[in-house]
């Protein structure tokens, strides 16, 4: 849990630097973590799709997507924000030297970018494995793709 809290702490510190932001920094950090966990779930589902060859995400109704967002946001709310828990998380981390802070913040952002990149990787692999069938071209623009 300490790594999870540190991740929240780093995002909170980064978000608190935004002077003209309407949302409070604890909410921004909470939202980023919730979206990142949803990205992890999507990556897992895409890997299952790729391994077993059937589609799951494409068959989900819109309400299923909303339910997934709520499924990841509600526990994060209780872990991070409920009854001002974020204040205890922030107090639990001592001020860091600038060099160490920069290294750790870089590691957090590399992790975020890696999750985003990997969540798109199975989709790309499916495109290359199955090939792309062009349905038609109008004025040099691709009209549709069959995947």
Image (cartoon, grey):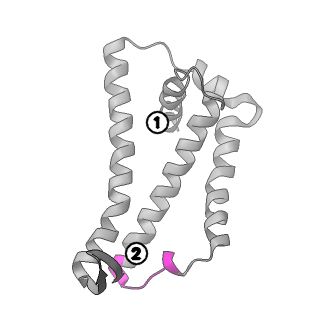
Q: Mark 2 highlights which residue?
A: 48
| SS of the residue under disc 2 | helix
Q: Residue at x 37, y 11 (%)?
A: 97
Please say if 125 is above or below 83. Answer: below
Q: Mark 1 highlights which residue?
A: 3
> Which of the marked residues, 1 or 2, is nearer the chain's N terminus?
1
Q: Relative to 119, is 18 on the left or the right?
A: right
Q: Badge 1: few (under 14), some or many (20 or more) residues near its Cα, within 10 Å?
A: few
| SS of the residue under disc 1 | helix
Q: Residue at the front extreme? A: 139
Residue placed most toward the observer, 85 or 68: 68
Residue 131 % position (x, y): 23, 83
Q: Residue at x 66, y 30 (%)?
A: 22
Q: Relative to 94, is 89 on the left or the right?
A: right
Q: Is residue 57 magenta?
A: yes
Quadrant of image for the C terminus = bottom left
Magenta residues (range)? 50-58
Quarter of the rendering containing residue 63: bottom right
Please say if 87 is above or below 57. Answer: above
Residue 83 % position (x, y): 77, 32
Residue 85 % position (x, y): 69, 30
Residue placed most toward the observer, 137 or 109: 137
């Amino acid at each position: 849990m300490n790594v999870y809290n540190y991740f929240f702490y780093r995002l909170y510190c980064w978000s608190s630097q935004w002077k003209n932001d309407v949302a409070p920094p604890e909410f921004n950090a909470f939202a980023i973590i919730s979206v990142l966990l949803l990205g992890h779930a999507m990556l897992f589902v895409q890997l299952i799709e790729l391994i077993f060859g059937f589609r799951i995400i494409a068959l989900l109704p819109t309400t299923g997507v909303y339910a997934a967002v709520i499924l990841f946001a509600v526990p994060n709310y209780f872990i991070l924000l409920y009854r001002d828990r974020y204040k205890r998380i922030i107090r639990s981390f001592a001020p860091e030297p600038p060099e160490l802070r920069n290294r750790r913040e870089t590691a957090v952002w590399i992790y975020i970018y890696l999750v985003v990149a990997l969540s798109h990787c199975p989709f790309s692999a499916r495109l290359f494995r199955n090939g792309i069938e062009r349905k038609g071209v109008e004025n040099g623009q691709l009209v549709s793709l069959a995947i």
